[in-house]
Image (spheres, rainbow, N blue to C red):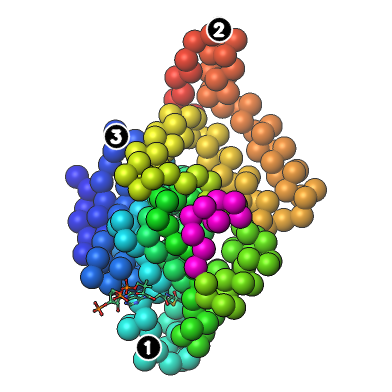
């Protein structure tokens, strides 16, 4: 039994893939405090569930998420956000999730919505997806990592263009720029994301978690340190039964049956 929430829906696909759907349709999935707390709880529950090998985070056809909830933020004071640790308090839970999280993005992914998608491990976009960091129009700047993760994904020129002019990037441009890994027609988006998630869920969980951790290290360290981190994790995987199974299966031309240990 998956728990029920007020602002998101959760379900399990093929017993291995956790799916979280942002569900505040009247506000285009604007991300308020309650929604972000629920999202963190749902992601943590899937992360702790041994049966789940990968998570897909999605929204509606019109909006993945149109950003942080502007109505809720409008009256915040500096003391409110600083003392309350706004954003850090519950938005960054997603960064602590050790299983892969795929963002399946259709429609608007603006402001905090774009930032949330970028906090996932990769983005599969529908052809109607629109990415943007329009906070400058509200008299603020991106606050959930947009000025840091966007340049790492698309480079300085496009990141500056988007953060300073507030223009939206369509799915094809986002793919060319490296923000998204694949673009598919909207009616194929969930199928594509679930298929990718199932591929991942059938690999060794230990190797999958190590791969995620190691790629993320590339954004936190210099090259030599990052390569050393990767090398040691690579060495460590020879201690798993899944390494023996994966290589024996290849040598003997049979499918591997990983035990995730
Ligand atoms: N917060 C709160 N409500 C929002 C919202 C948001 N970010 N985005 C949309 N909504 C609400 C609208 O107020 C509207 O509600 P009502 O029907 O009650 O009036 C409803 O969702 C539908 O929106 P629109 O009528 O505006 O729909 P549209 O199709 O005409 O336009 C849109 C769509 C271009 C996405 C437009 O809604 C929009 O520009 N939204 C704001 C986008 C934005 O500025 N995002 C950044 C937020 S700041 C942030 O995210 C900070 C951070 O880094 C953490």
Question: Label 2: few (<14), some or many (≥20) within 10 Å?
Answer: few
Q: Which residue is mark 2?
A: 252
Whole-number angstrom distance, CA of label 2 to CA of label 3: 29 Å
Q: Which residue is mark 1?
A: 74
Q: Earlier in the sequence, mark 2 or mark 3?
A: 3
Image point (53%, 46%), residue name: 181
Q: Quadrant of ligand 1?
A: bottom left
Residue 31 lies, in percent from the top left, at 35, 70
Q: Nearer the viewer, residue 28 or 122?
A: 28
Answer left or right for 181 relative to 89.
Answer: right
Residue 256 lies, in percent from the top left, at 48, 18
Image point (30%, 68%), residue name: 28
Question: Label 3: few (<14), some or many (≥20) within 10 Å?
Answer: few
Q: Quadrant of residue 4?
A: bottom left
Answer left or right for 54 relative to 133.
Answer: left
Q: Which of labels 1 and 2 is toward the front? A: 1
Rendered-image quadrant of the N terminus:
top left
> Magenta part mainly helix, strand or loop?
helix
User: In this picture, which residue range is highlighted in magenta?
Assistant: 168-177
Residue 195 to residue 22: above or below: above
Q: Secondary structure at mark 3?
A: loop
């Amino acid at each position: 039994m998956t728990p029920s929430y007020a602002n998101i829906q959760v379900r399990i696909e093929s017993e291995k893939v956790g799916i979280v759907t942002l569900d505040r349709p009247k506000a285009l999935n604007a991300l308020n405090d309650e929604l972000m707390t629920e999202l963190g709880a749902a992601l943590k529950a899937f992360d702790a569930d041994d049966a789940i090998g990968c998570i897909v985070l999605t929204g509606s056809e019109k909006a993945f998420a149109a950003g942080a909830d502007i109505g809720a933020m409008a009256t915040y004071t500096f003391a409110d956000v600083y003392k309350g640790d706004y954003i850090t308090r519950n938005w960054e839970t997603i960064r602590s999730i050790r299983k892969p999280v795929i963002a399946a993005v259709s429609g608007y992914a603006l402001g905090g919505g774009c930032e949330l998608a970028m906090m996932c491990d990769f983005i599969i976009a529908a052809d109607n997806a629109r990415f943007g960091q329009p906070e400058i129009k509200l008299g603020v700047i991106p606050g959930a990592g947009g000025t840091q993760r966007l340049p790492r994904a698309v480079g300085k020129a496009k990141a500056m263009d988007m953060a300073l002019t507030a223009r939206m990037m369509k799915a094809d441009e986002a793919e060319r720029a490296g923000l998204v890994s694949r673009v598919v027609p909207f009616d194929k988006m969930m199928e594509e994301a679930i298929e990718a998630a199932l591929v991942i869920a059938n690999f060794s969980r230990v190797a999958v978690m190590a791969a995620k951790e190691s790629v993320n290290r590339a954004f936190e360290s210099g090259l030599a340190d990052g390569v050393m981190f990767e090398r040691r994790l690579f060495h460590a995987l020879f201690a798993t039964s899944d390494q023996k199974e994966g290589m024996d299966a290849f040598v003997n031309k049979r499918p591997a049956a990983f035990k995730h240990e």
